[in-house]
Amino acid sequence: MNEKEIERNEWLDSFDYVLRQNDPERAINLIETLQTRAAGEGLALSRCANTPYINTIPRDRQPPYPGNRDIEHRIKSIVRWNAMAMVVRANREEAGIGGHISTYASAATLYEVGFNHFFRAPGEDSDGDHVYFQGHASPGNYARAFLEGRISADELKNFRHECHETPGLPSYPHPWLMPDFWQFPTVSMGLGPIQAIYHARFENYLADCGLKDTGNQKVWAFVGDGETDEPETLGAISLAGREKLDNLIFVVNCNLQRLDGPVRGNSNIVQELETVFQGAGWNVIKVIWGADMDPMLEQDSDGILVKTLGEIVDGEYQNFSVRGGAYVREHLFGRDERLLKMVDHLSDEELGKLRLGGHDPEKVYAAYHAAVNHSGSPTVILTRTIKGYGLGEAGEGRNITHQQKKLNEEELREFRSRFAVPLSDEEIADLPFYRPDNDSPEMNYLKKRRDELGGWMPVRRERAEPLNTPDETFYSEFHKGSGDKESATTMAFGRMLSKLLKDDTLGPRIVPIIPDEARTFGMDPLFRQAGIYSHVGQRYEPVDKENLLYYREAKDGRILEEGITEAGSISSFIAAGTSYANHSLSMVPFFMFYSMFGLQRVGDLIWAAGDIRARGFLVGGTSGRTTLAGEGLQHCDGNSHILAYPHPTLRAYDPAYAYEIAVIVEDGIRRMVHEQRDEMVYLTVLNETYLQPPMPDGAKEGILKGIYRLHGPLDGRKKLQVHLFGSGAILNEAVKAQKLLAERFEVAADVWSVPSYK
Ligand SMILES: Cc1ncc(C[n+]2csc(CCOP(=O)(O)OP(=O)(O)O)c2C)c(N)n1
Ligand SMILES: [Mg+2]
């Protein structure tokens, strides 16, 4: 040994000694102390946040597997078969009907371990866990629900044929089409993950505001590795880290492929995501290798295997999944004599079947177990799988895999044999769905596991009690008009919100959500009145403490001041707006934003809000092309209502007067929380000040329907007569035009206010 080696060994011996005292904290502390010292001396330490390309949880720290592996494997194989049969049948009957086989094939173990051991269903006194399933893996959910007896064979047969005589199943999770089943319409990629984050935060909000004990509930989000390209997927992960959302678990299925090809052919998606999540303060658990790799890793005393595994790019890993054992021997282990020796005892066939972590239930269980027991930060599980696992030549790990929907008889036979599905060669030609007898060990096991976890999942239910809402007198101050004082509808709306927050019944259910625009909308008085929600309260004295309207953060603060993120704010809106279904509690979110940055900027999330049956108010501020034009295009909203009109569950209003707003808000709240209709209201408010007129008699019905006569003609005897329509910012101009037409052009005009052309 040379001097350097002796020195290194001495250090390692000391470190091992500390570790052997069974005190990992001390060992960690030593390393951190050394790092601090080195940094103080100006040494350029590596800032890499990566750990080696191996499992985070080594074999000797895996908990024992609590289930019956054998029966679970049989159940999973049957679910795999039925999921595949459903899609292949549908495409046999009608080419081009579509559907997905390969995503569920790669995720089956990830789901089944969850169903058998982790996902808790809603029960009498709990609303259970909330699981955001990957939308296009839905065939797996349907196939499992078929075994559970919740979905019939006829429904499976009519997959993607909602209009057949026996209505079939929708392609993707959809709470309108399957209102007792799907909770989260996840298929627009990226929107599931961001909603899951804000949902997890909303659970803390409910608890901190004293509305509900959510302590025990978890939010799980299953995410594709390709899906992490969407800005929404990763865009809010720092919020989850900052808020220490340990009720949140992401499972990223790293099958290394998206639709067209590899996610990161030239680099490594697991390692990339590890640094990103680590940097955002998440607990990262990598589940890369299955048990087959453990013996090799345990022999790897000089680290050559770990080093080699870390150098291979994903495009090459994809080859290892496809090209068989001889290729793996040559191109992976063949890189070094020492590696070759490690796999001497394995045949090519065995080497070709080295299982990845995401297909190994024990490894997946260990990760989930660690995640649900972790506290202090959210957890992300990055797990390697093979896309199209089990499809063999028909498309396992290939670039065409995502689109694969057809298998020939030979391929079906192989699939059947590989997963030992008890169907004969003759039977499989017709692609039957298979369900074991009700009293079979498989069915008993399946039921027992789910009974212990509270019942079937996914399941959507609506248990919120209807609430009484304030009557007309509550709003009468707005019906009266502003007398000789000019004011803007934004001010009236702010006043209404403030009043609603103080209402005994409804007040605690109002959730104001603002992306850094409260002052612009003159809503800063709400800071003091309602407080800005912060799980940790206010750990500093605000600079403006001596002001009446200081920036007040509080643990029971009611305002979600989200910062500059419309995507985050609408995700909070969705969490609050679906609380009636997910948390048995009606809430009324009011999301206030610049109208230019709403339907246009986060339109797809607003579609998701409709699809998920959210309730609440979207309030577009400073709308209308005539106001604040000097500030540029961000206030030149001439189109948001056009974007709002196609949304089926969004009632859109462009009111001009305070009383119109009062009527719309009163009616909207009643419909949402008393009549329990799953609808939203889009409302624009203006910041131009003018005299707010009193409400004309009998106008209420017209306001809600969208049109009423504001002023009759000034002089009905004129020969030429026109009707002037106006809404929002233009309405007062129509009133002026009426006079002008009468005085200068001999035209008798009446004026109609049209708060909604919809
Ligand atoms: C916003 C959006 N863009 C495109 C698609 C179409 N699409 C469906 S699945 C898919 C590939 C998904 O890849 P990945 O996230 O890796 O999931 P995997 O199927 O591999 O598990 C694409 C592009 C979509 N559903 N949503
Ligand atoms: Mg993928």
Image (spheres, rainbow, N blue to C red):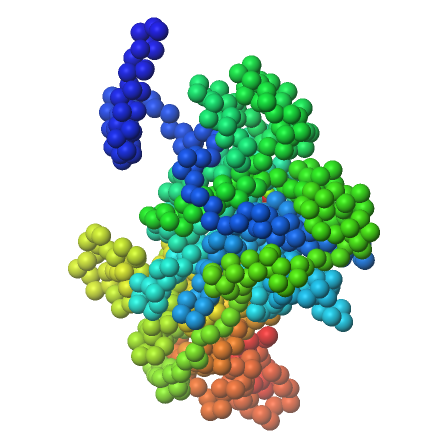
Residue 322 location, quadrant = top right
Q: Is residue 623 visible?
A: no
Q: Is residue 695 above or below residue 363?
A: below
* Viewer-nearest residue: 555 or 110: 110
Residue occupying the far top of the picture: 2
The residue sitting at 37% across, 59% down in the picture is 216
Q: Is residue 753 visible?
A: yes
Q: Residue at x 39, y 86 (%)?
A: 471
Left or right: where does residue 722 sit relative to residue 688? Answer: right
State the residue at coordinates (68%, 66%).
152
Quarter occupied by the C terminus: bottom right
**Residue at image point 40% right, 29% down:** 48
Give the percent coordinates (x, y) of residue 159: 71, 61
Q: Position of residue 619 (x, y in %)?
A: 45, 67
Q: Position of residue 612 (x, y in %)?
A: 54, 65
Q: Quadrant of the N terminus?
A: top left
Give the camera-side residue of 289 and 199: 289
What x and y, as percent, mark residue 241? Answer: 37, 47
Quick check: 474 left or right of 459? left
Q: Residue furthest bottom?
A: 717
Marks counted in the figure total 0
Residue 252 horizontal side relative to residue 405, left or right: left
Q: Is residue 530 above or below residue 255?
A: below
Looking at the image, which is closer to me, 202 or 138?
138
